[in-house]
Image (cartoon, grey):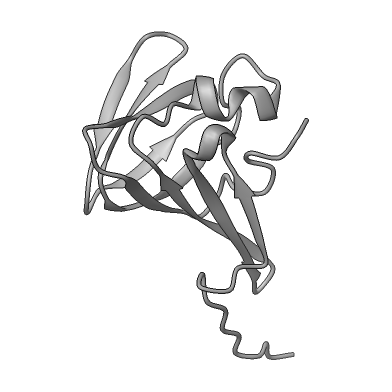
Amino acid sequence: MAGKLERKSFDKPDETRAFRNGKGKVEVVTIGGHTFGRGIFEPGWRWSEHVKPIAGTASCQAAHTGYVLEGRMIVMMDDGSQAEYGPGDAFYMPPGHDAWIVGDGRCVLLDFTGIGTYAKPA
């Protein structure tokens, strides 16, 4: 049985999850049985300050696979290793990390794998 074409816009997401203190949000769409997110992280955003109180875990336990559209983000793993991501970078961030925005601009990225429960109350 063949599937059908589907289209959704992040301009009208299925769900929007706000981060603490107005430091951004994730817009969520589910299409073709897959859940995608567009994360918008404002300057000064840090997972351990703006999402940890929502998630209730010591570090982010989602595995993220995606693409950075604008801005810069540093991700530090629980073991201390870290990487910086910027525009045009595809990324994989395994569970067990903190992250924060670099500089004075916002960071916008698309997440294809880790958004199902991200920034949802525990």
The quadrant of the picture occupied by the N terminus is: bottom right
Judge by depth and name the residue closer to the eye, 89 or 29: 29
Residue 47 percent across, percent down from the top left: 49, 27
Apparent side of residue 34 relative to residue 72 in the rendered image (left or right): right
Taking the view exactly as shown, the residue that stands out farthest to the top is 79
Q: Looking at this view, name the residue that lies furthest to the front.
A: 21
Question: What residue is at 33 percent from the left and 45 percent from the top?
Answer: 107
Residues 14 and 2: in front is 14
Q: Percent from the top left, x then y, of residue 78?
A: 47, 12
- Could you tell me which residue is drawn at 67 percent across and 49 percent down? 116
Between 122 and 78, the one lying in front of the other is: 122
What is the total number of numbered labels drawn onto the structure image? 0
From this view, report whether residue 63 is shown above or below residue 60.
below
Q: In the figure, 96 relative to 40: above or below?
A: above
Q: Residue 49: x, y in percent?
A: 52, 21
Give the quarter of the image for residue 93: top left
Instruction: From the top left corner, tell me how far across and down residue 61 is, in percent.
Output: 60, 27
- Which residue: 36% across, 29% down? 44
- Which residue is depicted at the point 37% across and 27% down? 100
Above or below residue 115? Residue 84 is: above
Relative to residue 3, is residue 36 drawn left or right?
A: left
Answer with the quarter of the image where residue 121 lies.
top right
Does 59 sit above or below residue 6?
above
- Quadrant for residue 13, please give it: bottom right
Q: Quadrant of the C terminus?
A: top right
